[in-house]
Amino acid sequence: MRPHVLAHRGASHEHAEHTLGAYLAALEEGADGFECDVRLTADGHLVCVHDRTLRRVASNRGIVSTMDLAELADLDVAAWKHPWADLDDERPERVEEHGKVLTLRTLFEVAADFERTIEIAVETKHPTRFGGLVEKRLGELLAEFGWHRTGSPVRVMSFSNTALHRVERVAPGVRVVQLMREAAYWPMLRRTIGRDWIMGPGIEVLREHPRLAGRIGQAGHEIHVWTVNTEDDVRLCQAAGVTTLISDRPGYVRGLLDDDGGAAR
């Protein structure tokens, strides 16, 4: 069975991460779904932003959690990706809306309106000044879309084990993914995660510890891996029985898998 491919922050190899443009491009490339990081603004909106500050993507020193959505909406978070784009006469004209800070609500609307089911993996970032309020707001938004029940296209990911236990309380039908940076954490985590939790090691972890996937599988857990961008890593994940690949290059990875003749679910 072909692994599913989720676009890591959108099709972020070619497009500015977490922008509407990056996610629309991922749909065009045939991604099975989206991955996004979320943070809470000062006025309570969940926005798709990875870093605590906006220095990297908007040359702005503002801290996301101290800014209102209206302040964020004024920022261009796409120009950094292709700084010389205005000098390229052959580059497609930019759509301003596609380079703005994206709310999770808007991303959910894009997925809900699409012609096929779009999976969404939402990573809540911790630590944060808002603590459990992040998961509370996420649970409320999931309920608005009817995605808090079993069968939801959304799964919630976090490095914080505590945050995932909160998700189980606010949206008990939604599956959760325990992210993991080090193989050494597995013996401890396996004692704290739920029976149907998914494990989410980084690709570097699988490269360095080739037996880890087998141990996770033997414990009865699915595996989702980030960030899978090369053919070697795709083959490694296939051999390890990984069910979902999270990639900056969803179209490329889908092409590799489709060339194998793997049948989609």
Image (spheres, grey):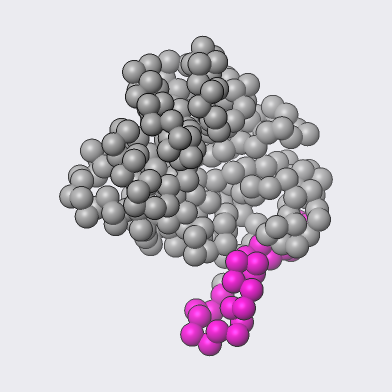
The quadrant in which residue 55 appears is bottom right
Q: Is residue 34 left or right of residue 218?
A: right
The quadrant in which residue 162 appears is top right
Q: Is residue 90 magenta?
A: yes
Quarter occupied by the N terminus:
top left
Q: Is residue 105 left or right of residue 215?
A: right
Q: Is residue 140 visible?
A: no
Kindly report the secondary structure that dominates the magenta region of the rendered protein: loop
Q: Position of residue 16 (x, y in %)?
A: 57, 62
Outermost residue, front direction?
208
Q: Is residue 126 left or right of residue 259?
A: right
Q: Is residue 239 left or right of residue 127?
A: left
Whether residue 117 is situated above or below residue 176 in the rendered picture: below
Residue at x 29%, y 57% (from the top left corner): 255
Quarter occupied by the C terminus:
top left
Residue at x 39%, y 43% (from the top left corner): 245
Outermost residue, left direction?
261
Q: Position of residue 155 (x, y in %)?
A: 47, 34
In-front residue for pair 175/52: 52
In-front residue for pair 153/92: 92
Residue at x 81%, y 56% (from the top left corner): 61
Q: Is residue 217 visible?
A: yes
For the magenta stretch, what is the residue range?
Answer: 70-94
